[in-house]
Image (cartoon, rainbow, N blue to C red):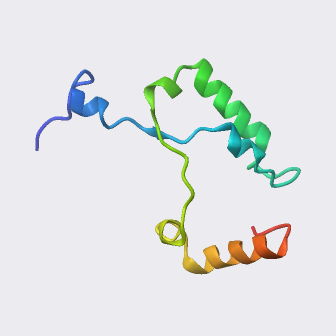
Amino acid sequence: MSPPPAPTDPARRARRVGLLLDPLFERHDTGRGHPERPQRLARMREVLAASRLAERCRPLPIVAADDTTLTRVHDADHVARVEEACATGAGLID
């Protein structure tokens, strides 16, 4: 097995962490007390900027996900439940 690439190796730099970071995400309000809330996301964005960690990541484009993409990481039944909840205006899906 070969040793891992040196920190200055271009191959290592090419494998940076991808980062999806957009104020748009802060519009997703799941309600009071839920851990996924706008203030938490805003604070994470501030800390990433202040610590300069965001600079070390590769920004990824924000794109809409279709069902094929969603079911790569979520069960199809879960995707269907979320779609139904959105269609009917359900308050909670957790």
The N terminus lies in quadrant: top left
Kindly identify the residue that appears in the image at 48 percent across and 24 percent down.
Answer: 55
Q: Quadrant of residue 81?
A: bottom right
Q: Quadrant of residue 90?
A: bottom right
Left or right? Give the position of 83 relative to 58: right
- Where is residue 92? Give x, y as percent: 82, 67
Instruction: Give how far across and how far down residue 76 sits, in percent.
Output: 56, 78
Q: Could you tell me residue 22's position as x and y percent?
A: 63, 38
Place of residue 74 in the rendered image (x, y in percent of width and height, measured from the top left): 55, 69
73 lies above or below 32: below
Q: Residue at x 79, y 37 (%)?
A: 39
Q: Nearer the viewer, residue 30 or 64?
A: 64
Going by the image, does 77 lie left or right of 88? left
Q: Quadrant of the C terminus?
A: bottom right
Figure check: 25 above or below 77: above
The total of numbered circles placed on residues is 0
